[in-house]
Amino acid sequence: MKFVIQRVSEASVKVDGVTTGEIGKGFLVLIGVSNDDTKEIADKLVAKLLKLRIFQDENGKTNLDLASVGGELLLVSQFTLYADCKHGNRPSFTNAGNPVLAEELYEYIIEACRAGGAKVETGVFGGDMKVSLINDGPFTIILDSEEL
């Protein structure tokens, strides 16, 4: 499982011209699922996400987590995080999780983040989404379950 976390001052996602999720200060999180992923792996990444201290404190140090700044989450499923570009110029997506498993885990992650106290907005699983953001910093972190 992979989370690409971008600290944002605002972000939104639209599907067919309709806004499905919109946040102010917080994290835009692109979520990739592989066939090897489980709810236990999701729990580890969600725990890390919610405790990630990458907001500045009064001294300008990245020392505050999402809850400390009243931040929000915009969670967007993105199977292309598992693109394999080793051979040729056309990516292969065989490492991405099958859609049934991926959607189940995406929904599980949404609920786990809400249960952890976060305000959560979302994209639409499998939708043709248009994501807009103002990356604050820019500050981007990649959490990969294979590295935790």
Image: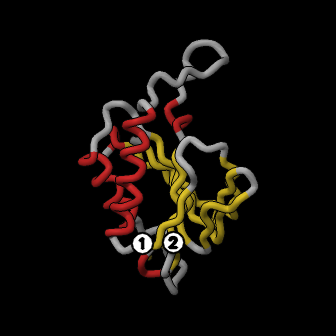
Residue 118 numbered mark, or none: 1
Q: Looking at the image, tell me whether mark 1 or mark 2 is earlier in sequence order.
A: 2
Q: Helix or strand or loop: what does disc 2 sit on?
A: strand
Q: Residue at (43%, 81%) from the top-left corner? A: 68
Tell me where residue 58 appears, x and y as whole percent.
Answer: 51, 86
Residue that extends furthest to the right in the rendered view of this protein: 17
Q: Residues within 10 Å of mark 2 (few under 14, many from 20)?
A: many
Q: What is the tally of numbered marks visible in this picture?
A: 2
Question: Taking 50 as reference, is 71 above or below it?
Answer: below
Tell me where residue 124 appears, x and y as whole percent.
Answer: 56, 51
The residue pinned by badge 2 equals 72
Q: Helix or strand or loop: what does disc 1 sit on?
A: loop
Q: Picture quarter containing residue 126?
A: top right
Q: Amino acid at mark 1?
A: Ala
Specify the quadrant that holds the N terminus: top left
Q: Are marks 1 and 2 in contact (CB under 8 Å)?
A: yes
Question: Taking 71 as reference, is 82 above or below it?
Answer: above
